[in-house]
Amino acid sequence: MGCMRTDIKEIDDGYELHIDVPGFAKEDIKISLEKGYLTVEAKHEEKDEEKNGHYVRRERFLGSTARSFFVGEEIAEKDIKAEYDKGILKLFVPKEGTNIKEKKYISIE
C-alpha cells in the first residue's frame, strides 16, 4: 500500500478529509495531533495463525503506513471529528480551532 490516497474538500467552516485505508479495522488506525500536524497511522500486525504455512503468493499489505497534514497549532484534538466506514476514514478539521494562545506582553520596569 502506498501512501494513503486522500481527498480534501473545503466547506464553509472547515475541511473534510477522506482517506483511503482499505483492509484496516478501526482499531488498527491511530490519529494524533502534535505541533500543528495531524498524523494518521494505520498498522497491520501479523497474527500467529498467519505465520504458519508457506505463502506461494502474498499481495496483502502487512506493516504500517502513515500520513501527516499540517492543520495549524490553533487546532486542538477536541476540534477534530473522525469516523470510519467501509475502508474510508473521514475527518473534519475546522478552519478555526479552540487552542488559541494568549499573546503575552513583557512588562517594562
Image: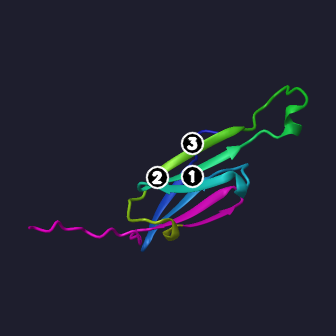
Q: Is residue 106 left or right of residue 97?
A: left
Proximity of marks 3 and 1: CB atoms separated by less than 8 Å? no
Q: Amino acid at mark 3?
A: Cys
Residue at mark 2 to residue at mark 3: CA–CA distance = 13 Å
- Give the residue at the far right of this rendering: 53
Pair 2/3: label in front: 2
Residue at mark 2 to residue at mark 1: CA–CA distance = 9 Å
Q: Position of residue 29 (x, y in %)?
A: 65, 53
Mark 3 Cα within 10 Å, few/some/many (few <14, many 20+)?
A: few
Q: Amino acid at mark 2?
A: Phe
Q: Amino acid at mark 1?
A: Val
- Callout 3: SS: loop
| Sequence-earlier tag: 3 or 1 | 3
Which residue is depicted at the point 86% across and 38% down?
48
| Highlighted magenta segment, given as a residue range | 81-109
Residue at image mark 2: 69
